[in-house]
């Protein structure tokens, strides 16, 4: 089958690889119809993780079930399914509590929690930027989609990662109806956090970024765009909240946060959140941070450490929630919002490409080229 293979920093190629196949009785085999390029793919693409060469990327996957193992009871051939990027078992201690991003069964390293498709440090699982994908524990991991899934793939494809991840960020930040929320990052996840804050009836949603195309998308759904290349985001948020700060805040950038001049400061957005969220406010962090980053220009962050303004954070009595989204905790409900027309996450999609054009898609998205806000790939040519 054809698949997008990581060959080294900024080198990805579509190649022939061995076909994905059923390996265990509980596996499901999915023919991928839509798979998205994600901001977290870029950390791997840029060589800023320990991703091994030769691996197939792609953790935002949906498609049609073409084969099921003999131990699969619910999922059927022909079903259209969304696959959470977390691969989880459903029966371990963390999965029992809905914490499927921290599954204890699916990582091959027993000291780790959590696994994912085509992801550095999250198990050997192949990604879905390919014609076919093996899905372990298929009954548990496949969300069977409604009737209109085939026609509305650009919406439903967001259920594998970024819509639940944006929602999770607002959960971690305890966003309540009527709250003001400041979101750092207007990439796909930040925009989904803004959509989620809207769905939760936040009264004021402020989104900080510096790319005009992304800020325009935030504005399209009624968020207040804040351009941090034109002035301090701290001053701008404080002005918009009459000096009080936002009730809650979302971090949707991660460890490669940089100033408008391009210098990386891994704690930049975390410290801006401490400054722009009110005393006793809550902060959710879903932007990716990693334990080691040998390629970091920041000496401390090579060991995953950041200069966090803990004194001010403590003094303001703030709370912070972190980590990857437990996609299964939300994807069924969010699918319902899409089906009933209450959410249309496809508004951020800028490009839909065949798999063969994935290398160009990566290049443009990585360059943050104007207008390349979210790229969907269609390995089935559809
Ligand atoms: Zn993703
Ligand atoms: Zn588990």
Image: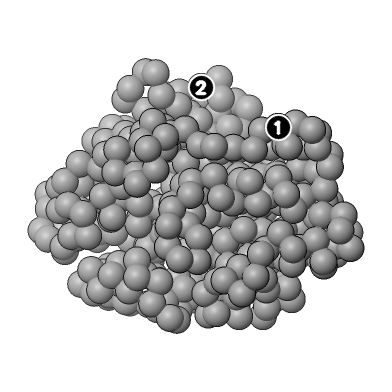
Say if residue 152 shows up in the picture: no
> Alpha carbon of mark 1 to alpha carbon of mark 2: how far?
37 Å
Vertical placement of residue 179 versus 346, above or below: above
Circles 1 and 2: CB atoms closer than 8 Å: no
Q: Height in image: 224 above or below 313?
A: below
Q: Residue at x 20, y 41 (%)?
A: 52
Q: Give coordinates of residue 361: x percent, y percent.
A: 30, 72
Say how many tags the image has.
2
Q: Nearer the viewer, residue 186 or 381?
A: 186
- Report if residue 240 is visible in the image: yes
* Residue picked out by circle 2: 92
For residue 249, which numbered disc appears in the image?
none
Point 37% across, 63% down: residue: 37
Q: Badge 2: how crowded within 10 Å, few (<14), some, or many (20+)?
A: some
Residue 200 picture location, percent across and down: 79, 58
Query: Secondary structure under badge 1?
Result: helix
Which callout, 1 or 2, points at the residue further toward the start of the chain?
2
Residue 342 drawn at (x, y percent): 72, 69
Q: Residue at x 38, y 77 (%)?
A: 369
Label 1, on which residue? 311
Instruction: Give the vertical position of 212 relative to 326 (above or below).
Output: below
Report which quarter residue 126 is drawn in.
top left
Q: Quadrant of residue 217?
A: bottom right
Horizontal side of 211 relative to 231 (left or right) equals left
Q: Does mark 2's beta carbon lie closer than 8 Å to ligand 2?
A: yes
Under circle 2, the secondary element is loop
**Residue 73 percent across, percent down from the top left:** 45, 38
């Amino acid at each position: 089958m054809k698949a997008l293979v990581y060959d080294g920093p900024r080198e990805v190629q579509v190649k022939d690889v061995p076909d994905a196949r059923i390996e265990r009785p509980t596996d499901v085999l999915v023919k991928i119809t839509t798979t998205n390029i994600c901001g977290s793919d870029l950390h791997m693409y840029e060589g800023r993780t320990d991703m091994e060469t030769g691996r197939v990327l792609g953790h935002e996957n949906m498609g049609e079930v073409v084969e099921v193992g003999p131990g699969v009871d619910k999922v059927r051939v022909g079903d259209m399914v969304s696959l959470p990027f977390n691969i989880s078992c459903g029966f371990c201690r963390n999965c029992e509590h809905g914490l499927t991003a921290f599954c204890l069964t699916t990582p091959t390293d027993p000291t780790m929690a959590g696994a994912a498709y085509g992801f550095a440090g999250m198990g050997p699982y192949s990604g879905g930027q390919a014609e076919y994908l093996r899905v372990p524990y298929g009954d548990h991991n496949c969300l069977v989609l409604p009737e209109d899934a085939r026609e509305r793939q650009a919406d439903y494809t967001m259920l594998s990662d970024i819509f639940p991840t944006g929602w999770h960020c607002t959960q971690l930040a305890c966003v309540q109806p009527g709250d003001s929320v400041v979101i750092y990052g207007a990439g796909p996840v930040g925009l989904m956090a803004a959509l989620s804050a809207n769905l939760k009836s936040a009264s004021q949603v402020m989104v900080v970024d510096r790319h005009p195309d992304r800020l325009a998308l935030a504005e399209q759904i009624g968020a207040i765009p804040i351009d941090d290349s034109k002035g301090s985001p701290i001053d701008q948020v404080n002005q918009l909240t009459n000096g009080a700060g936002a009730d809650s805040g979302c971090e949707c950038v991660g460890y490669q946060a940089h100033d408008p001049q391009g210098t990386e400061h891994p704690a930049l957005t975390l410290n801006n959140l401490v400054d722009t969220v009110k005393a006793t406010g809550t902060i959710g962090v879903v932007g990716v941070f990693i334990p080691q980053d040998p390629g970091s220009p920041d000496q401390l962050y090579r060991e995953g450490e950041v200069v966090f303004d803990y004194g001010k954070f403590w003094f303001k009595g703030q709370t912070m929630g972190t980590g990857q989204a437990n996609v299964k905790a939300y994807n069924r409900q969010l699918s319902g919002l899409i089906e009933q027309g209450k959410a249309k996450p496809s508004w951020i999609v800028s490009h839909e490409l065949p798999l063969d054009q994935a290398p160009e898609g990566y290049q443009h998205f990585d360059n943050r080229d104007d207008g390349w806000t979210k790229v969907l790939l269609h390995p089935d040519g559809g």
